Image (tube, rainbow, N blue to C red):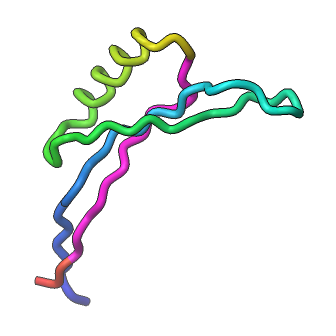
């Protein structure tokens, strides 16, 4: 089995924020994305996200990190 190296190329903070109500009465959500440094630590990203959330007029449903990773065989 080959040894695989994974290198993070891009990293984004993605927050799912309430954006209104659908015609059926369900809550709709929109994604807000913020570019991060590839080496950003998850705990620091979470701290920044909760600080951003405290400034938003509408509540959030989820805080996610989206990584684009390049895989190479070593």
Q: Nearer the viewer, residue 41 or 38?
A: 38
**22 relative to 66, above or below:** above
Is 67 placed left or right of 41 in the picture?
right
Q: Quadrant of the N terminus?
A: bottom left
Q: Residue furthest left?
A: 74
Residue drawn at x 31%, y 54% as measured from the top left: 67
Q: Residue at x 23, y 54 (%)?
A: 10
Residue 60 is inside the magenta segment: yes
Q: Quadrant of residue 54?
A: top left
- Region of the chain picked out in magenta, as a range: 59-71
For the view shown, which residue lies furthest in the bottom direction? 1
Magenta stretch prevailing secondary structure: strand
Task: State the quadrant of the C terminus.
Answer: bottom left
Kindly identify the residue that appears in the image at 62 percent across and 27 percent down.
19
Q: Is residue 66 left or right of residue 31?
A: left
Horizontal placement of 15 versus 52: left or right? Answer: right
Report the residue at 33% width, 27% height from top: 46
- The image position of residue 9, as x and y in percent, is 19, 60
Q: Is residue 3 magenta?
A: no
Q: Position of residue 26 (x, y in %)?
A: 80, 30
Q: Nearer the viewer, residue 44 or 54?
A: 54
Q: In the picture provided, is 29 more to the left or to the right than 33?
A: right
């Amino acid at each position: 089995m080959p040894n695989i190296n994974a290198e993070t190329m891009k990293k984004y903070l993605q927050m799912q924020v309430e954006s209104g109500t659908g015609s059926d009465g369900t809550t709709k959500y929109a994604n807000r994305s913020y570019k991060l440094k590839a080496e950003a630590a998850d705990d620091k990203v979470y701290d920044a996200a909760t600080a951003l959330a405290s400034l938003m007029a509408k509540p959030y449903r989820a805080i996610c990190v989206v990584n684009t990773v390049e895989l190479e065989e070593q």
